Image (cartoon, helix red, strand yellow):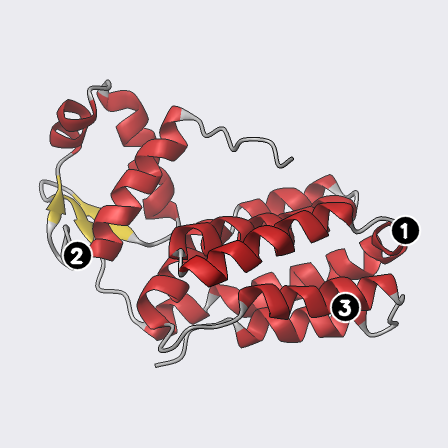
Amino acid sequence: MTPPVVHSLREQIREHILEGIVSGRWQPGERIVERRIAVELEVSQTPVREALRELESLQLIESAPNKGVRVRNLTADDLKESYPVRAGLEQVAAELAAGRLAEDTAALEREVAALREADAAGDGEAQVRHTVAFHREIVRAAGNAVLLHTWEGLGVEVWTTLSIRWFSPEPRSHAQDHQELVDAFRRRDPRIGALLKAHVLSCAPRV
């Protein structure tokens, strides 16, 4: 049984704001008012401010003196910038984790099973959640704290959400794509690093 996902208050607020941007509640150039979000969610302004800072660090929103925080006008090219960096990190992670994951792919298989359900239901939110969890398991298995910290700092969940929700022109079998990676780990494929790198790059949004 997959344990429940527990998010901090800041993460919940971040996801609320991100959903508002993805759904079009806040249009590019539109101001996001910290106080209004705090009132709407019945929280203090501190975690809202923290969530906005995180989204700003990812260049999803921008702030200016006396103008507040506004949604950036993002393009597919903006989203694509993080993918070569992420692909390089995950290539290293796969090579470091190869031996460990060849012996035990249970954590990866759980996420693939969840992705099959998400694909069948057309559940975009679940596709994002389990896609990111799959890749996080690989990075964690590398056993390198610096690598994990750097990968987490890329905001993979945010960019994956935008890529799938905004720039995926047609349904994609996320489960099948990831099952192929599990199979490569199991058979100790010496190309696993290159395979994972190619997989990540293939997920970059296309215009």
In primary-sequence order, the first of circles 3 and 1 is: 1
Name the one closer to the observer, 107 or 154.
107
Q: How many numbered marks does the figure carry?
A: 3
Residue 176 x, y percent position in the rendering: 62, 69
Q: Position of residue 62 (x, y in %)?
A: 24, 50
Q: Residue at x 47, y 62 (%)?
A: 120
Mark 3: secondary structure? helix
- Whether residue 139 is visible to the viewer of this picture, yes or no, is no
Q: Looking at the picture, how far across and down is residue 167, in whole percent?
A: 35, 72
Residue 5 in the figure: left or right of residue 184: left
Q: The residue under label 2 is which amino acid type?
A: Gly
Q: Name which residue type carries label 3.
A: Gly
Specify which label sits upstream in the sequence, 1 or 2: 2
User: Depth check: 155 or 59 in front?
Assistant: 155
What residue do we see at 14% from left, 27% from top?
A: 40
* Label 1, label 2: how far apart the Cα atoms are: 45 Å
Element at badge 2? loop
Marks 3 and 1: CB-CB under 8 Å? no
Residue 118 on image: x %, y %: 48, 56
Which dot, 3 or 1, sits closer to the camera? 1
Q: Nearer the viewer, residue 111 or 91?
A: 111
Q: Residues within 10 Å of mark 3 (few under 14, many from 20)?
A: many
Q: CA distance from mark 3 to mark 1?
A: 17 Å
Q: Where is residue 115, by image quadrant?
A: bottom right
Image quarter of residue 207: bottom left
User: Label 1, on which residue?
Assistant: 103
Q: In the rendered image, which residue does mark 2 sit on?
A: 24
Q: Residue at x 29, y 71 (%)?
A: 75
* Residue 176 in sight: yes
Q: Which residue is mark 3?
A: 193
